[in-house]
Image: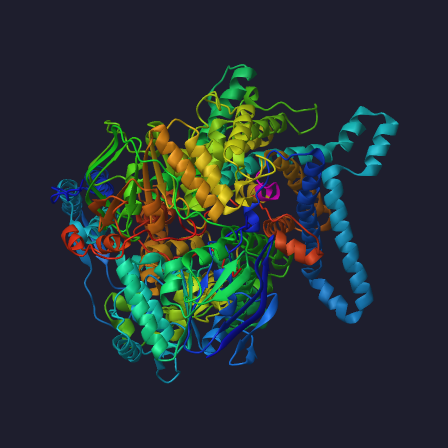
Amino acid sequence: MAEPLPGPAPAEGSTRGTVPDGPTLAARLGTTARGLAVPILAIFSALVIGAVVIVLSDVTFFERLQSDPGAALGAAVGEVLRAYRELFTGALGSPTDYVDAFTSGDPDLIRKAFVPISETLLAATPLIFTGLAVALGFQCGLFNIGAEGQLYVGAMFGTFAGFAFAGLPWFVHIPLAVGAGFLGGALWGFVPGLLKARTGAHEVIVTIMLNYTAYNLISWILKVPGYQREGRSDPISKVALDSSWYPPLVEGLRANWGFVLGLVAAIAVSWLLFRSTRGFEFRAVGFNPTAARYAGMSIATSTILAMTISGGLAGLAGTSIVLGVTHSLTFGISSGFGFDGIAIALMAASRPRGIILASLLFGALRAGATPMQSLTGVPIDLVVVIQALVIMFVAAPALVREIYRIRVPETTGLETFSQGWRA
Amino acid sequence: MTAVAATAPAVIVDRAAIRRQRILGVAYLVMGAVVAYFLTSNIKTDATSTFVLKPAGSQGGLDIPSLVVPSMLTVYLAAGICAGFGAIQLIRGFGTRWSVVLAVVAVAFVFAFLTWAAAGKSVSLIGILQLTVQKALPITFGALSGVLCERSGVVNIAIEGMLLSGAFTGAVVGSATGNNIVGLVAAALVGGALAGLLAVLAIRYRMNQIVAGTVINIFASGLTSFVAARVLQTHRELNEPEKFSSLPIPVLSDIPIVGPMFFSGNMFMYLLFVLIGLIHYGLFYTRWGLRVRAVGEHPRAADTVGINVILTRYRNVILGGVVAGIGGAYFTLGSTGSFVHDMTGGRGFIGLAAMIFGGWTPIGGFLASLIFGFADSLQARLSILAVAVPSEFLLMAPYLVTIIVVAGLVGRVRMPAADGTPYEKE
Amino acid sequence: MKLELRGITKRFPGVIANNDVNLVVEPGEIHALLGENGAGKTTLVNVLFGLYQPDEGEIRIDDRRVTFQDPGDAITAGIGMVHQHFMLVPVFTVTENVMLGVESVRGPLGQQLDRPAARKRIVEISEAHNLHVDPDALVEDLPVGVRQRVEIIKTLYRQSDLLVLDEPTAVLTPQEDEELFEIMRSLKASGTSIVFITHKLNEAMGIADRITVLRAGRVVGTTTPQEATLESLAEMMVGRHVSLVVDKEPAKPGATVLEVKDLIVRDDRGHVTVNGLNLEVRAGEIVAIAGVQGNGQTELVEAITGLRHPVAGSIRIEGQAVRLEPRKVLEAGVAHVPEDRLEDGCVPAFTIAENLVLNTYYRPPYSNGLQLDRDAIGKEAETLVRDFDVRTPSVFNPVGNLSGGNQQKVIVAREFSRPIHLLVAAQPTRGLDVGSIEYIHRRIVEKRDEGAAVLIVSTELDEVLALADRIAVIYQGRIVDILDPESATPQQLGLLMGGSGPGEVAAAANGESGLVVTAHG
């Protein structure tokens, strides 16, 4: 029998989607390896371009280039290496510190050697939540750019629960505060979900507008008497009570059980997406809303539920900061964690396992950026630039393929998208 | 067995339209209630609101008297209008004229708000109107940029990033060269370059256009902040460009109300009007425009008649970037002067909403931007009056208005059919 | 012009669409390109038109070799094409569509559109060739037959010497077919060559001077209507002896399963497309709705399956007024095989197993309410794939990787594997190869014999005549008549589909008798 053509235009590479249950282990490993190629090369390329940015933004570089090119280039390379070295050791610790600590056996020294890793875990924690939030949205075909705002509203609710209920034991207070944070974020995710489901309003614009609304909301509430810290005129909230603080993983280090909560959340989201009945609907609606509707699923329900849970997860990112680190709410608790979430979700192709890895990576970058800035003067905004470049390479595998001349899978985790402004 | 044709049906019922009608009716009634209850508080019974209609300190032109209204009465009247139309809307609806009624109710509500804010005092209405137009300028540039891109079928979320880069480039190059026109041109070029990047990612690498736009926004935000921190902190002289001074047009700027609003700005305003005219004419009256629109609606059809779809999209996106770059330069060279981290504050996205509201046309985009510009002007003008509403909520106004507009309009406006879909030949 | 295609080969990933194809079209000749769905006809003309570049081979016009980088080159060389799916911008007027790409301009910079000049020329062409259109009408408001005229005017506007028509009769009634053939003869008389793509044997026999048959990308042979017969053509097209009828017993209809009364439905643009429709389908019978696309069939199916709320009227399934939502309708025992299998029928990125439970995943045994039972789903999938002969190495492959025929089988397997009282199938064999078509037809008849009521919507008259126990003709949102396939003729059907009332049709009932045959029977 004649094998017919697949139609006027052959099936796109993107419909050869990710295979949830691959047949053999070898094939799965092969897929994983090829799947990792893009993120790794993306990071590498981003770091290279970041290096160029560092060099070119040094005003003295151009002057020195004219007088003594060789020395200028040497100095430039040196500067880049120094900056990246501080970035690296700031994230993972310096080998010499570890060696010294362990040979001396001094518990204090050992603890100090692990500070960078602790900072990395600490920085990764909110990212796991925002990454999960955005990924959940992606899997349902939704673009949640509002994780930042949801994070803040979650933090707002969580802080309130933290300082408003005295005399509760920690095993009641922490879940209460965490629940409050989830609720706050969920509310902020519910609105765009509802609007999209009922009116078709595109969630990109609505979530971005809600981000700005959230910033103003926080601005306002930090000056309201019942919320603002007594005796202070600057916008800072009351201090959350001890019983609501996330306990640290190791005494003396800042990394706390919020990270473990993040791991738990990742497992939960994985179950939700790939094993639960609801998750099946989310993914069907994400891949092909019309077919889902024809098969009897309710697009509206999936949209609203997915956005709400997504918002809640981002809200948990907020609580992980206020209950785990700052113990109070100010304006600067997040420096773009919501947008990092987009990068992480893309790098991980919206899969929870990958999100944990990607969060650790970005957490490492952020943790290292602060010492990098203080020791070499390279501003931490460099991390934002690197992050944007990583997203770009990960979301356009064809670009990586062209630059490095390798075969890469065509999937980006974004095949769920209906295009443009259409609902 | 034969089928029998049915007799004419009794009533044809459109459920969705009825629901919309009811929601609008209830909304009007609620607005009326809000006006009657909240906006009448704290008004002394004999208070009047004075609306100054001539800019302070302007010479020449007619001497228009200020508009003085009895505050309480005006507010109740506005409440009556809202509630009255609300009732009619609930019961009967207004058929095809529903948008006119919506505009009337909105105006009544806003006027009641202003009357309340100005009770017993005097507020410069002309000042608000002037600021409205000024705030609308960058939003309109954003909307025009969006129109150029989306009419050819490419979604451009990166307008925000292009505005920001334009602001940055305009300030820095303008300061470095001491020439603000060179700064403006540089801003335009940078906008075009970013758009070129968007085009390459979206067209050649078929990246999801929303992701591509988001990437560029993050990249622009990070890079401008990075360089600002690294270079501009220490070299302040690179962040002090010469602004474009205002250029009132001789006769036109003396026309009452309209003059100060539209003909007394700086060259950005006039450039914008020229652009609106050019793009409108171009899209709907020239061969270029017909081809662009064909590419945006049905790229395969355009391809089969020999139009180069890819090239058209590249050209339009880059053009859109140039317009956005110029619009970004307005923030620094046309308004505040120095670049500040993330100074565009979402105006690029509001511009997109204005584009949608305006039906993907330049003139529509401008009119829509005026509405957003008005919302944007409230905080600046009304906080002076120590209005009972916290200033943070006034700052939220443009964003909330955008949400309402976007939610209310979807399905009502026709977007280019191929918007956002990458074109594949084989 | 004389057109020659020599050794054209075009490959796509996994498939050779055209394999060393040779074709000669003499000046002023009507040449039919015949083949079943998927034989490579559209690919070939896309190569000719510059939309694809051939991997091997060359194109010669008037004995000179030419290459076309894009359609612009082909148009300049004098080739015009009327595509199967119209290449018209819906929101533009007829004038704008026709002049797109060759716009009349005026003004100092040569940029301003000169609509009046173009309009004048369109009117001239329209009158010269009897192609009546309103130049200022918006294309989206025009019926399909008129849109085709616009496409033809587009080619004439560009002074084409060779016209390629890709399946032009797919959207026409038999009467409109005749009008089209008249236009073709008139064009031929004025020297235009025509390449006419079709999968309908009788059309090729009726109008062509020469016929070239394609099968699986290769040329099987070139012949003339004098030398060939319908059977010989059919065998060339398919490569084996083809049974030209569907094997079925007479129907034994039972109780009424579907009852539609006075139904009124609006489409997305607010137009009333189902306008007081009445229909009954009984258990154990196949009712086929015949009609030109755009007469309300799509909205009727959407209303019955709960995808679109009717504005008035009632739909009853087994006497119950079912809540008109897809899930409720499906649970009431209705199976729906949608028109567009990739868009509406399946989730291409999901695996075969996941697609097979797309309607039932939320119920035991596939789910306990909260969580899916992967093993149960997998096992069921294995069974169904076997039963329905779906060719795939694993049930965990994405459906998007399957061929069209296998995809449709997955959809059919899904729908047929639950107890159903009513089967609604829209264009069930569109774009499929002969083997798959035969298979699907067989399964549909099987379902009927099991006692289900079957409602088919098809624009393929042959399928309708072959499958149906009763034929309901739809025109402008109403069923205008119901015919018995044994006695109905394509002419009668065509007249009804085109709007003539039953009375006129009865009066004209001495047309040609017998079945219309195509290779898929």
Q: Nearer the viewer, residue B326 or C518?
A: C518
Q: Nearer the viewer, residue B21 or C426?
A: C426
Chosen colour scheme = rainbow
Query: Where C309 sits versus B112, above or below?
Result: above
* The residue positioned farthest toward the bottom in the image shown: C108
Tell me where residue B130 appears, x and y as whole percent: 32, 61
| Residue stretch in magenta | A344-350
* The residue positioned farthest toward the right in the image shown: A103
Query: Where B361 sits versus C365, above or below?
Result: below
Query: Left or right of C388: which side holds B350?
Result: left
Tell me where residue C412 appears, x and y as whole percent: 44, 37
Tell me where residue A149 appears, x and y as whole percent: 47, 40
Residue A222 visible? The answer is: no
Q: Nearer the viewer, residue C341 or C187?
A: C187
Residue B25 visible? The answer is: yes
Q: Total number of numbered labels? A: 0
Tell me where residue B94 appears, x and y as whole percent: 15, 49
Q: Is residue B36 magenta?
A: no
Query: Where A19 sits versus B259, above or below?
Result: above
* Residue B12, picture quadrant: top left
The residue drawn where x is 68% and y is 56% is A49
Query: Where C414 sits versus B103, above or below?
Result: above
Query: Left or right of B332: which side holds A119?
Result: right
Query: Left or right of A252: which side holds B316?
Result: left
Q: Nearer the viewer, residue A249 or C341?
A: C341
